Amino acid sequence: MDTFKETLSIDIENVTVAYHGKVALHKASLQLKAGTICGLVGMNGAGKSTLFKAVMGFVKPVSGRVLINGLPIRHVQKNNLVAYVPQTEEVDWNFPVSVHDVVMMGRYGYMNFLRMPRSQDKHAVRDSLERVEMWEMRDRQIGELSGGQKKRTFFARALAQQAKVLLLDEPFAGVDVKTEKMMINLLMELRDIGYTILISTHDLESITTFCDQVVLINRTILAYGETSEVFTEENISRTFGGSVIDLRTSYKKQKS
Amino acid sequence: MELVNWFTAPLQFGFMVKAIWVSALVGIVCSALSCFMILKGWALMGDAVSHAVLPGVVLAYVMNIPFAIGAFVFGVGSVVAIGFIKSNTRIKEDTVIGLVFTGLFAFGIVLVSKVKSTVDLGHILFGNVLGIADSDIIQTVIISVVTLVAIAILRKDLILFCFDATHARSIGLNTTFLYYVLLSLLSLTAVAGLQTVGIILVVAMLVTPGATAYLLSDRFDHMILIAMASGMFSSVMGTYISYHIDGSTGGCIVVLQTLLFLTAMIFAPKHGLLVRSRQYITD
């Protein structure tokens, strides 16, 4: 893939999102420059998926605004600026599509209305599948894959979209070590050529290993920035409402 | 000779020739759509829409406009009503669907009982392909062409919409448009289907062939071809069988479709029961 000339950023300015009168996200602000892997950490219901939806343009904030690379959010979908890799639990694995079909779906935004793939589409698909080492499996129906292979397929779809902002939802849940290592390496390569990668995860340990930035969320953005500065015990306990500390102290009590 | 005769004897009657052509066409079109219906999880919706169109069909008859228009208005309208009630009350989706379509269906029955004369409720409920009027044939052909062309052009987007509507939206596809396209095609094919099997059974035409093909294929393009073949086969053979046994045409068609499904369920090479039980033993 080519290195990108412009720097990309996610610019969330004082965004409030509400569903049916309940506030899911309150005055959230976040700015990410291009070339970063950023972990998104928070409890369930803290607003992680709402944040993703705001970046993808799926929800309209009640106040505030979202800019992707300086462009207002309505440009995101038509211009393939943001790609989303879903949790594998949400997919219908019995659907009669092959690995290749799924990755090609990442290209529909570029194709003519009959969705006939041209050579650049076929190249993008092949390139993506080779990057995740799934090219040999391209004709398999998706239900025949292992957990790690399933993740890689959807990751390849996001790559084929050639979007410079990647949103990953729990990408390492239930994944084998080999796939996890491969994906982390791939993410770091993409970061080095200017991708902005936001990963929603519950795996606190992994954050320190490969996320250079972290965002802590609990109905609002509590803190964000360099992992070394922001990922402190105090901030973590604010994010989880003290529950993490309680777990650790109760374990210590059991040991003694 | 006996066997050839079995096939050629009915063809000496003009009404049988028409019936066989029309049911073949309707079988093909409904089966094509059924693939999308079962993958999207719209079987219950299909049942609802096919019943909800009854008042539309009767009103269209009274106003002397094509059935398809009346059916379309009530088909799409019923789904809009379902959506409205679901979003604005605490009632769950399956309940809302049940109460909307039965209410509309009952309204249609009352209308029929008042209109009487040449509107035969039996024909609408159970189909009347053997007595189909030429104007209805033209309407059925138009609906079939529109449906097949729409599916041919929008196939890939509709497949993506059924598989992963979120992704479709995120790459800029208009998922609301695709939703209403599927819903409109459902309403139109319900009208086509009611000619051959009637309102009560039309949901079978929109579900069973897709289900059969789903067990026999892992690729969508194969699935839709298998569905269309099975739909056409059961419609034509069902019509033939109903002639020879002097029984309900619609009933014969749907029974045959169901038998095809049961055969696939047991013998399908990858997803059938026999294959699965053998896997149990060898694992």
Image (cartoon, grey):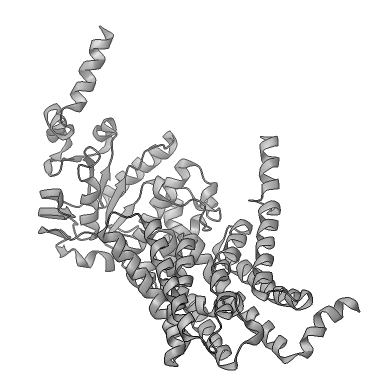
Locate residue A182, reporting x and y percent. Answer: 40, 41
B252 vs B113, left or right, is: right
Question: Quick one: B102 or A171, which is closer to the camera?
Answer: B102
Q: Position of residue A242 (x, y in %)?
A: 16, 27
At horizontal 25% and vertical 35% (from top left) the residue drawn is: A207
Which residue is at 62% across, 81% downward? B128
Identify which residue is drawn at 45% across, 67% down.
Answer: B48
Which residue is at a point 66% across and 68% down the rendered structure image? B230
Quarter assignment of residue B144: bottom right
The relative height of residue A138 versus residue B226 in the rendered view (above or below) is: above
Picture coordinates of residue A79, whole percent (x, y): 27, 67
Q: Nearer the viewer, residue A68 or A93?
A: A93
On the image, the x and y values in percent for residue B222 come to 60, 65
Against A122, is A246 above or below?
Answer: above
Q: Is residue B174 above or below residue A88?
A: below
Residue A198 is left or right of residue B217, and the answer is left
* Residue A167 appears in the picture as rendered: yes
Regarding residue A118, the answer to whether it shows in the image is: no
Q: Is residue B75 above or below residue A25?
A: below
| Residue sticking out furthest to the top | A256
- Residue B12 left/right relative to B111: right
Judged from this view, the residue extending furthest toward the right is: B1
